[in-house]
C-alpha cells in the first residue's frame, strides 16, 4: 500500500514539474497573407524606437545642462523602452519574416519576466516623472533640495525593485503549472495570459494575480499621477501671469501625453484579452504587440518635439554633421 502511494505521488510530481523543451509561437493567426506588410510596420517602428531612444540617451549624456532630475528620469524611461521593445520585437519579426516559431521554455519565461517587470518599471518611472513636475511647479525654490542625487537614486532603485517584485511571482507561479504536453502559444511572444492558457492544472491563482496585479498597478499609478496634477493645476492657476501659466503647463504636456498612451494601450489590451470574447484573435494579438511597441516608438518623438532643450540640441547635432 505504501509503495503504491509512493509511486502515485512520484508520478504526480513528475507530471506537475514536467514542461516542454520549447514552445511554438503561432504569430498572428488569420493575417498570414499580410505578414510582410505587418513585419515592415513593426520593423519601422522598432528602428525609429532604437534611433529615437538612443539619440535621447546620447544627448542627455552629452549635454551637462540636461543633467537635471527631469532628464535623468527621461533617460531612464528611454532605457526601459529599449529593453521592452528589444525583448519582443526581434522574435516577432523572425516569426513574420522567417517563420521561426520555436522558442525554448526558459527563453519564453525570460521574455515573459522582462516584459512584465519592465512594463511595471516604466509605469513607476512615469509616476516618478509626475512627482518631478509636482516638485518643480509647486515647490520651485526647494526643487533641487527635494530631488537630490540620493533621492533620485532611491527612486530609481524603488522602480527597479517594484518591477522585479511584480514579475517574479508570475514566473514562479507559472513553473508550478502542469502543461500536459501542450506547447502551442496563440501569440507572437510569450505573454503571461497566453502561456497560462496552456495549463491543464488549476491556473486560477495565476490568472487572478496577473489580472489584479496589472490593473492595480495602473490604477494606483494613475490615481497618484492624477493627484499630483490636481496640486499642479492648483499651483498653476494661482500664478498671476498668463504667460507663466502656459509655460508651466507646457512642461507637463509631454509627460501627460506619454502616460496616457501607455495607460490606454495596456488597459485596452488587458481588458480586450480577458473579457471581449467576440473579438478576433488577431486583434487581441495585435493589441498586445502595440502596448509593448507603441510607447517606445512615440516617447522619443513626443519629448524630442515638445522639449525645447532636446529639440535645439538635435538641431545643433544635425547642423554639425552636414
Image (cartoon, grey):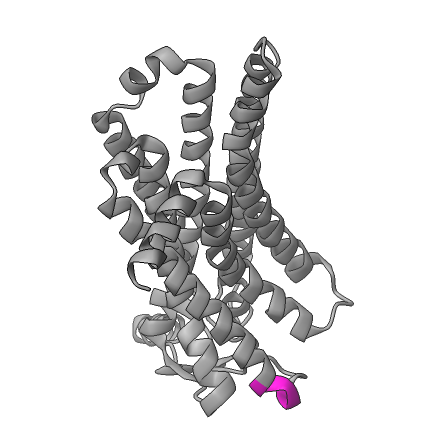
Task: From this view, report whether residue 277 is shown above or below residue 218.
Answer: below
Tell me the quarter of the image containing the C terminus: bottom left
Name the spot of residue 113 as percent of width and height, x first: 37, 59
Give whichever of 149, 277 is nearer the camera.
Answer: 149
User: In the rendered structure, which segment of residues is drawn in magenta?
Assistant: 32-36
Does the stretch in magenta take in 251?
Answer: no
Residue 231, placed above or below residue 6: above
What type of secondary structure mainly makes up the magenta span?
Answer: helix
**Which percent across, then down, holds residue 147?**
30, 23
Residue at the image point whose x is 34% and y is 50% from the top: 316
- The quarter of the rendered structure image containing the N terminus is bottom left
Q: Is residue 251 visible?
A: yes
- 11 or 291: nearer the viewer: 291
> 102 or 169, which lies in front?
102
Please count the marks in the image.
0
User: Who's the residue at 57% across and 16% down the image?
Assistant: 236
**In the image: residue 228, left or right of residue 65:** right
At which x and y percent is residue 91? 42, 77
Q: Residue drawn at (51%, 66%), measured in percent from left and top?
A: 196
Can residue 168 be seen here?
A: no
Residue 4 position (above or below residue 53):
below
* In-image side of 218 versus 67 (left or right): right
- Residue in the picture at 39% in, 45% down: 312
Q: Residue 178 at what x, y percent from top left?
A: 44, 71
Amino acid at each position: 500500500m505504501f509503495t503504491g502511494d509512493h509511486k502515485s505521488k512520484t508520478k504526480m510530481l513528475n507530471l506537475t514539474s514536467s514542461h516542454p523543451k520549447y514552445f511554438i509561437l503561432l504569430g498572428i493567426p488569420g493575417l498570414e497573407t499580410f505578414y510582410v506588410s505587418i513585419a515592415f510596420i513593426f520593423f519601422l517602428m522598432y528602428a525609429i524606437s532604437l534611433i529615437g531612444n538612443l539619440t535621447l540617451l546620447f544627448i542627455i549624456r552629452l549635454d551637462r545642462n540636461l543633467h537635471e532630475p527631469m532628464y535623468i528620469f527621461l533617460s531612464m524611461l528611454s532605457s526601459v523602452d529599449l529593453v521592452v521593445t528589444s525583448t519582443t520585437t526581434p522574435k516577432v519579426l523572425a516569426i513574420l519574416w522567417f517563420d521561426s516559431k520555436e522558442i525554448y521554455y526558459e527563453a519564453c519565461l525570460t521574455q515573459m519576466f522582462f516584459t512584465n517587470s519592465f512594463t511595471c518599471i516604466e509605469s513607476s518611472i512615469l509616476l516618478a516623472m509626475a512627482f518631478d513636475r509636482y516638485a518643480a511647479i509647486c515647490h520651485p525654490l526647494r526643487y533641487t533640495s527635494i530631488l537630490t542625487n540620493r533621492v533620485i537614486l532611491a527612486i530609481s532603485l524603488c522602480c527597479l525593485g517594484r518591477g522585479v517584485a511584480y514579475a517574479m511571482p508570475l514566473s514562479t507561479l507559472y513553473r508550478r503549472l502542469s502543461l500536459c504536453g501542450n506547447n502551442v502559444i496563440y501569440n507572437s511572444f510569450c505573454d503571461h495570459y497566453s502561456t497560462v492558457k496552456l495549463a491543464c492544472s488549476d491556473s486560477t491563482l495565476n490568472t487572478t494575480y496577473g489580472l489584479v496585479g496589472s490593473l492595480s498597478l495602473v490604477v494606483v499609478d494613475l490615481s497618484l499621477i492624477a493627484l499630483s496634477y490636481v496640486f499642479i493645476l492648483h499651483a498653476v492657476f494661482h500664478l498671476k501671469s498668463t504667460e507663466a501659466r502656459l509655460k508651466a503647463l507646457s512642461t507637463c504636456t509631454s509627460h501627460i501625453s506619454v502616460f496616457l498612451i501607455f495607460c490606454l494601450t495596456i488597459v485596452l489590451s488587458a481588458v480586450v484579452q480577458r473579457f471581449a470574447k467576440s473579438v478576433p484573435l488577431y486583434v487581441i494579438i495585435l493589441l498586445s504587440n502595440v502596448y509593448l511597441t507603441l510607447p517606445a516608438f512615440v516617447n522619443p518623438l513626443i519629448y524630442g518635439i515638445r522639449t525645447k532643450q532636446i529639440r535645439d540640441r538635435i538641431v545643433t547635432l544635425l547642423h554639425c554633421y552636414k
